[in-house]
Amino acid sequence: MKIALLGLPNSGKTTIFNALTRSEAEVTSYANAKAEPNLAVVEVGDERVTRLAEMYRPKKTTYATIDIMDFCGVSRGAAGEGLFPPELMQWIRNAHALAVVLRNFEDDLNGPPDPVRDFQQIHEELLLSDLLIAEARLDRIRHGYKRGIRSNELEGEEKALEKIVGRLNENVPVRGLELSPQEEKTIRGYRFLTQKPLLLILNSDEAGFGKNEGVMEELEKSGRAIEFAGQFEMELARMEADEAALFMEDMGIGESARDRLTRFAYRILGYISFFTVGPDEVRAWNITKGDTAVDAAGTIHSDLARGFIRAECFSYEDLMECRSEKGVKDKGRFRLEGKGYSVRDGDVLNIRFNV
């Protein structure tokens, strides 16, 4: 799972990045035009993994992870090019979700905050980027028609792109369209930016944190929104756990920025976790809700999917209640599932396979 942090210059993206990842990336008050993002891997806090490790005492414990990419502040170039220079686009299109950081604090360079306006500027740029790609592909398809290149697949692609172009011109993101499964499949390769799940992060100062109901309501009209006190959260990430807990209590923050973001990310991406357990390793794996046992096997290793026979399966809740795998079997809660089984959040799987 990869999340791209986007925002205008001096929105506090790198401060948020450091708070989420406990990194020490340089925080600057000036736009940084470097093409490559700051990268870090964040463990998804999951008490279930901790308790499974206590039960199995494995040599290794592996939590699910999220890759966070922090891009330089985007701004319109002097020559009139868009907010997102070409060298950034490949990185951004590879992300599974976009998190837009919006400044909600006074800034000497940019003055009073206006997070709704800032989001609208970025939103329009994302729409334009997708529109240019869709229109360019339509032109190529129609040019091919003139040369006698026509097929049912191309005609279906043309119709899907015409629908997308029409709605983009009406300021509607691709994620807001009702597309058939075939249309979804047809456009998958374009990796449209406005089709990606969107998370809005209101980055407030410590004094204003928790006092922005109106702004949050306005942002929620465009996507899921969450509020962080970025500078405060970055300082918390550098403290010992006990000390940080005291400061969080004073601020009325029940969870760290990392835990809140990872929970949000799971929700907007529709992810669930399943587990593999044993004396060598206890591990959590990310899959999308609705994925089958074969999909889960392929997440572990392609050979397991290719040679899939059955999945030995029981739930984390049953294991905790029965206190052992033997207890699960004794109570008849141990199952053998086939290829079409839809894996549930908290399932413990062992894949039987033969290659």
Image (tube, helix red, strand yellow):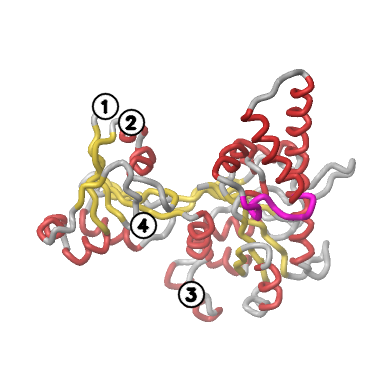
First in sequence, mark 2 or 1: give its number.
2
Point 78% across, 68% down: residue = 114
Above or below, comparing residue 164 to residue 27 in the picture: above
Q: Are marks 1 and 4 in contact (CB under 8 Å)?
A: no
- The rendered magenta stretch, by its main secondary structure, is classed as loop
First in sequence, mark 1 or 3: give its number.
3
State the image coordinates of residue 246 (x, y, percent, origin top left): 47, 77
Residue where numbered disc 3 is placed: 254
State the image coordinates of residue 199 (x, y, percent, origin top left): 61, 59
Q: Are marks 2 and 4 in contact (CB under 8 Å)?
A: no
Q: Are marks 2 and 3 in contact (CB under 8 Å)?
A: no
Identify residue type, mark 2. Arg
Of all residues shown, which one is farthest toward the left? 330
Residue where numbered disc 1 is placed: 355
Identify residue type, mark 1. Val
In depth, the one of 186 and 241 nearer the eye is 186
Of all residues shown, which one is farthest toward the front? 152
